[in-house]
Image (tube, grey):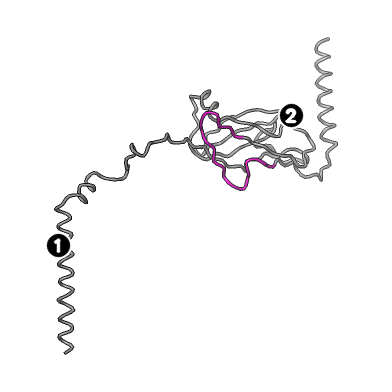
Amino acid sequence: MSSASSQSGSSGSGSSSASKTSSIPQSAPAGILSMTQPPQASTSFFKLASGEVVTFAWSFSGVLATPTSLTVNAVGANSFTYSLTSLPGTASSYIWTPYDYQQSHQATPLAQTTYSLQIFDERGLSATTRPGYLSPNTALTFALYTPQPYTPLASWQCTVCSGSNSSYTAHPAYVALIATFLVMFLSGFGLLRNAVAFTRR
């Protein structure tokens, strides 16, 4: 009895799926997901700090077969894929808190680098293009960075200055040496000018 019921349910699901597919014209374009926030045309930078959130928002165009679910991933420049969330197929935004994600994923910490956002339906990232079905979107690039702690001016030290260079410029012997060369240069220039003037007489 239960077997017959199961077969009936399976048949009904298959019939519904077939009806859904047959109702989409083969001439229809593939569905498109377009990012509306942040802008897709440029790379946005987000702070990896407590309380900082990132809002991803998008719109659909030409999607005739409503997805069952949406998967949102971030792929770093290090080629590592971070699974951010799974959403209902009708979702049009996702608010992400990178810092909270970092705290709950200590084994796979977020890197300070650029990322490519992936959004695709239950058919997967490599799903073939079909009329009316959502095509994966991987066009958005964003970056994460960790702010440096504030350093008071009185405590600031030049990280590229060498102690030997400082002593070189401050030592009186070097100052005297530079002054001597300067006097010799000016004296030589004066003698040369007088010699040229003498030869013209």
Q: Which amino acid is tagged 2?
A: Thr
Q: Nearer the viewer, residue 109 or 37?
A: 37
Instruction: Name the residue: 23% across, 44% down.
Output: 163
User: Within the image, what quadrant is residue 138 found in?
Assistant: top right
Residue 96 vs 180, above or below: the answer is above
Q: Secondary structure at mark 1?
A: helix
User: Within the image, what quadrant is residue 194 found in?
Assistant: bottom left
Confirm whether the magenta stretch covers residue 125: no
Mark carried by residue 180: 1
Where are the magenta residues, as a range? 34-54
Q: Position of residue 7 (x, y in %)?
A: 81, 18
Q: Which amino acid is tagged 1?
A: Thr
Q: Nearer the viewer, residue 123 or 38?
A: 38
Residue ID for mark 2: 68
Dot 1 and dot 2 residues touching (CB under 8 Å): no
Camera-nearest label, 1 or 2: 1
Instruction: Name the residue: 50% across, 27% down.
Output: 108
